[in-house]
Image (cartoon, coloured by chain):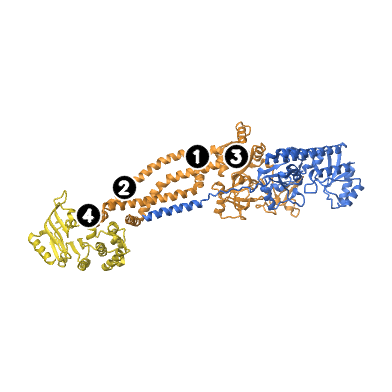
Chain colours: A orange, B yellow, C blue
């Protein structure tokens, strides 16, 4: 056995490239259906898990899928915003509390999620370093954002001026990183969390600027009629919130009119949830409330249907690969007739020769299985990417 | 020693037939089999080695009647007593020189690989002048070097009988002489019998005996040689 | 064959390493121990009322603040305390603006003026414009809401409700305490109404514009200045005041604290009595009810 393995291995090693091509083909054929199965199953588990831990999402009427994807995965789906008034209204009903979410802004291509500290508590995310954001201008990073951008507590990150909202006053805001979250294996790892007030500042609803009453520089004021001060373009708008300029930051208008992409509703109990859903269904509350689990289930069902088609294709491709493999092996044995003959003349039995050839096939299959096995487990790392790229 | 009597062999679906009344090969002697192509020289080597079995007659080596052995026994007989040298060397291209020489040990469970074997391979390769090439693959060797490797492989099991089928057929004149000298030298030193099929008539004077298949031996000659063997032993 | 089995073993080890390194560590951040619910408040009236309603069932936190808590800027440690609180009681009416510039969990915040939000008094600020959003002003509300005892009672009700939500099992305990306070507040309210109701159009001066709710709640027309109790106003200010005195019937002035004797003397000489009516936004030696009782007493004296 040892000698058969040795000779088989020598043969395979000598024909490295051919072996590699064969092993790669078998690996792919073994891996793809299984890996896909794993990715889909794992994706299902993760998506359902995240959906199941989110009882209700409330947002403007429209696509329920977009609403869920935006709220759970912070994907760039353009959502019609609702207002803070709706958040306050829902809070005032006493069925539970709302966690507002405002998305649509990015920093270095990672989504900025404006929310409240309740989000972290609700998702049960702990800190790997640093602490919660304390003041305006602070933010905390998901584990992967910090890893990939090599950022740590105390560093800064600047929001990109582009957004999905058509606001003219979107300014880049330099935010201070106060903490890095622990990994959660969810989209939270790839998000930048900040106080929703900060997102409003990024949006231009709130801002900080030089004191217009500063009499030392009269050029700041273009006009001052009946207490209506018109400022000149010289007024310096702050793009970073510091202890020094913190007090100059203010919001225009009533907070209840400020936008929110969606809100996660955390009910007091099952009964409250049922009553609240009833109110949504009866049209008493005008916004839309969706149960993420149902939406994700529908989304996954369509994925499963596609997967069934793929399964059929893989069976056919697998069978074709097997036939090609048999053909290659048959041709190889024919080409090696002289060698086999020599072995037999020198004193090898046919059984031994068959053993060596089988060992070659076995090594290739075991190697393919091993590679497929590694790929299978490594693919687990890409579940979130898979979800983002292929499911959402 | 090796005696062939009343042998008759015929390939199926072919007109070729080999008939030998009586043929004797003495121990430690070098024999050349000559004759035109298709006269049965290689067939005789196959019959002696037990690769083919005769339809009639017997092949007796010492006390063993080769033609009556089972296939497994014939294989055992081959591996333990016979070394083969072929015209086209029949080296395994994916094994290096050392492993090619070791091959008989890799393919037969009766032969155990131990330190002795390894040192013997080293000695043999030095003997054949190929010790520098042990880690090389056959494709990187010259024809002459390849045949030396093949000879080492034939000798590694310390055979009593070497069957060489045109061992110099693919070699230039200089190498022909060298290869044959190597075989002769070894056979003389170790008392090994050599039976060589050859077409190279210029080499014939070096053999102890030349058997011409075109005029197969007469009964008288056989008896004469038998007596000679008896007297010697 | 040994080679094959060792390769399989190798692969198993590799996959185990990959597995054990996978970022799947979920940690639970749970509150340690079984300590009392922690309630953080933004001013002393709320501290006092909460303490009276919550009793020993809760721990109330009101930071040590120098100056007016309405304009306080918290340090990081205080922010963390507020962030970790089980309940944050806000005054409402834009009081403690810092709560709008720090990150606090929304679910633990309760606006204790929510029951009278429609009665808040708006204050106009400077209107200005810059940038694309056009003209705007930074408006706000008068925030010493508790000086109207009816408001104080509604603050107390909001506090009681929030505490019941926090510890439903202590509902009865909180209710009993709440009723005791309401009784006292109602009494103070009646007293204030009685004292201020004697005159049809009661007018009073105030050293600072902080008595809006007192004025609105008890029908007092208040003329406010920006005078500090420990600082003698300039002569110009006195002249202005003398002029005003001719146009108003007011003959008493509210002070947040006892003014300098020379201020009191000068006012007395002008026929204006000093009424110390402490808003008590920051920590002081009295509880809220006692302080208000003392204020009512002072007012009574001042108006007689």
Disc 2 or disc 4, which is closer to the eye? 4
Locate the C terminus of chain C by quadrant: top right
Label ID, residue C294: none
Secondary structure, mark 4, is helix
Instruction: Give the spatial CA distance, label 3 vs label 4.
Output: 89 Å
Query: Which callout, 1 or 4, points to the residue nearer the camera?
Result: 4
CA separation in Å, label 1 and label 4: 67 Å
Whole-angstrom CA distance, mark 2 to mark 4, is 35 Å
Q: How many labels does the image show?
A: 4
Instruction: Give yes or no for contact between labels 2 and 1 (Cβ–Cβ under 8 Å).
Output: no
A281 left or right, relative to C144: left
What is the spatial separation of the Cα atoms under label 3 and label 1, in whole angstroms? 25 Å
Q: Identify residue for label 4.
A: B73
- Residue on which disc 3 sits: A80
Q: Which chain carries label 2?
A: A
Which of discs 3 and 2 lies nearer the camera? The answer is 2
Residue A300 circle label: 1
Residue A92 shown left or right of residue B91 in the figure: right
Q: Earlier in the sequence, mark 3 or mark 1?
A: 3
């Amino acid at each position: 056995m040892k000698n058969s393995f040795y000779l088989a291995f020598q043969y395979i090693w000598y024909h490295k490239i051919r072996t590699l091509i064969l092993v790669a083909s078998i690996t792919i054929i073994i891996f793809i259906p299984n890996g896909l199965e794993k990715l889909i199953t794992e994706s299902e588990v993760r998506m359902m898990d995240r959906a199941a831990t989110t009882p209700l999402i409330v947002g403007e009427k429209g696509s329920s899928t977009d609403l869920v994807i935006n709220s759970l995965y912070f994907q760039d789906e353009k959502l019609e915003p609702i207002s803070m008034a709706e958040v306050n209204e829902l809070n005032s009903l006493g069925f539970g509390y709302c966690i507002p979410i405002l998305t649509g802004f990015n920093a270095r291509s990672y989504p900025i999620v404006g929310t409240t500290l309740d989000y972290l508590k609700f998702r049960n995310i702990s800190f790997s370093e640093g602490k919660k954001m304390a003041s305006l201008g602070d933010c905390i990073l998901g584990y992967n954002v910090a890893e990939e951008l090599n950022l740590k507590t105390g560093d800064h990150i600047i929001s990109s001026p582009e957004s999905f909202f058509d606001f003219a006053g979107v300014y880049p805001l330099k935010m201070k990183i106060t903490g890095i979250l622990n990994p959660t294996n969810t989209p939270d790892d790839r998000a930048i969390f900040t106080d929703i007030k900060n997102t409003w500042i990024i949006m231009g609803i709130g801002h900080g600027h030089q004191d217009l009453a500063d009499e030392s520089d009269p050029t700041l004021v273009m006009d001052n009629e009946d207490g209506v001060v018109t400022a000149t373009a010289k007024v310096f708008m702050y793009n970073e919130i510091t202890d020094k300029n913190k007090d100059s930051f203010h919001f225009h208008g009533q907070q209840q009119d400020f936008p929110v992409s969606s809100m996660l509703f955390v009910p007091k109990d099952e009964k409250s949830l049922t009553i609240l859903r009833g109110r949504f269904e009866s049209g008493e509350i005008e916004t839309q409330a969706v149960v993420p689990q149902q939406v994700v289930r529908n989304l996954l069902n369509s994925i499963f249907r596609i997967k069934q088609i793929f399964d059929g294709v893989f069976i056919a491709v697998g069978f074709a690969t097997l036939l090609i493999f048999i053909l290659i092996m048959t041709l190889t044995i024919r080409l090696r007739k002289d060698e086999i003959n020599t072995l037999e003349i020198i004193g090898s039995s046919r059984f031994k020769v068959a053993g060596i050839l089988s060992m070659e096939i076995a090594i290739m299959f075991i190697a393919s299985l091993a590679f497929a096995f590694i790929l299978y487990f490594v693919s687990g790392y890409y579940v979130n990417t898979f979800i983002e790229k292929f499911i959402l | 020693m090796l005696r062939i009597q009343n042998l008759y062999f015929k390939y199926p679906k072919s007109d070729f037939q080999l008939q030998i009344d009586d043929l004797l090969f003495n121990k430690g002697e070098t024999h050349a089999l000559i004759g035109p192509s298709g006269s049965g020289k290689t067939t005789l080597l196959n019959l002696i080695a037990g690769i083919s079995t005769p339809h009639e007659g017997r092949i007796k080596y010492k006390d063993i009647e080769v033609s009556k052995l089972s296939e497994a026994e014939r294989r055992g007989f081959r591996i333990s007593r016979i070394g083969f040298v072929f015209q086209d060397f029949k080296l395994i291209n994916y094994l290096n020189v050392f492993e090619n020489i070791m091959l008989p040990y890799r393919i037969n469970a009766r032969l155990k690989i131990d330190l002795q074997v390894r040192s013997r391979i080293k000695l043999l390769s030095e003997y054949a002048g190929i010790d520098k090439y042990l880690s090389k693959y056959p494709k990187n060797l010259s024809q002459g070097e390849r045949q030396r490797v093949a000879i080492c492989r034939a000798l590694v099991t310390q055979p009593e009988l070497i069957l060489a089928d045109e061992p110099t057929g693919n070699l230039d004149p200089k190498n022909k002489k060298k290869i044959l000298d190597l075989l002769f030298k070894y056979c003389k030193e170790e008392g090994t019998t050599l039976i060589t099929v050859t077409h190279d008539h210029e080499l014939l004077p070096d053999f102890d005996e030349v058997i011409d298949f075109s005029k197969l031996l007469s009964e008288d000659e056989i008896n004469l040689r038998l007596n000679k063997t008896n007297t010697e032993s | 064959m040994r080679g094959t089995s060792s390769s399989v073993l190798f692969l198993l080890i590799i996959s185990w390493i990959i597995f054990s390194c996978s970022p799947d560590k979920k940690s639970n951040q749970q509150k340690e121990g079984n300590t009392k619910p922690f309630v953080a408040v933004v001013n002393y009236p709320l501290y006092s009322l909460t303490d009276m309603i919550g009793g020993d069932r809760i721990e109330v936190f009101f930071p040590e603040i120098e100056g007016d808590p309405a304009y306080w800027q918290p340090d990081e440690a205080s922010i963390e305390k507020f962030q970790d609180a089980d309940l944050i009681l806000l005054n409402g009416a834009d009081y403690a603006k810092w709560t709008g510039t720090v990150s606090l969990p929304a679910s633990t915040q309760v606006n204790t003026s929510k029951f009278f939000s429609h009665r808040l008094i708006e204050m106009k600020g400077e209107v200005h414009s810059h940038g694309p959003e056009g003209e705007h002003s930074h408006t706000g509300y008068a925030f010493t809401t508790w000086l109207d005892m009816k408001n104080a009672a509604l603050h107390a009700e909001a506090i009681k409700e929030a505490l019941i939500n926090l510890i439903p099992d202590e509902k009865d305990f909180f209710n009993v305490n709440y009723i005791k306070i309401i009784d006292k507040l109602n009494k103070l309210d009646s007293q204030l109404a009685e004292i201020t109701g004697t005159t049809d159009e009661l007018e009073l001066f105030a050293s600072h514009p902080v008595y809006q709710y007192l004025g609105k709640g008890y029908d007092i027309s208040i003329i406010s200045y920006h005078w500090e109790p420990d600082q003698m106003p300039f002569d110009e200010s006195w002249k202005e005041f003398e002029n005003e005195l001719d146009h108003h019937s007011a003959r008493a002035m509210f002070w947040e604290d006892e003014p300098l004797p020379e201020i009191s003397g000068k006012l007395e000489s002008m026929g204006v009595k000093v009424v110390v009516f402490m808003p008590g936004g920051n920590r002081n030696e009295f509880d809220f009810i006692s302080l208000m009782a003392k204020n009512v007493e002072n007012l009574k004296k001042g108006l007689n």
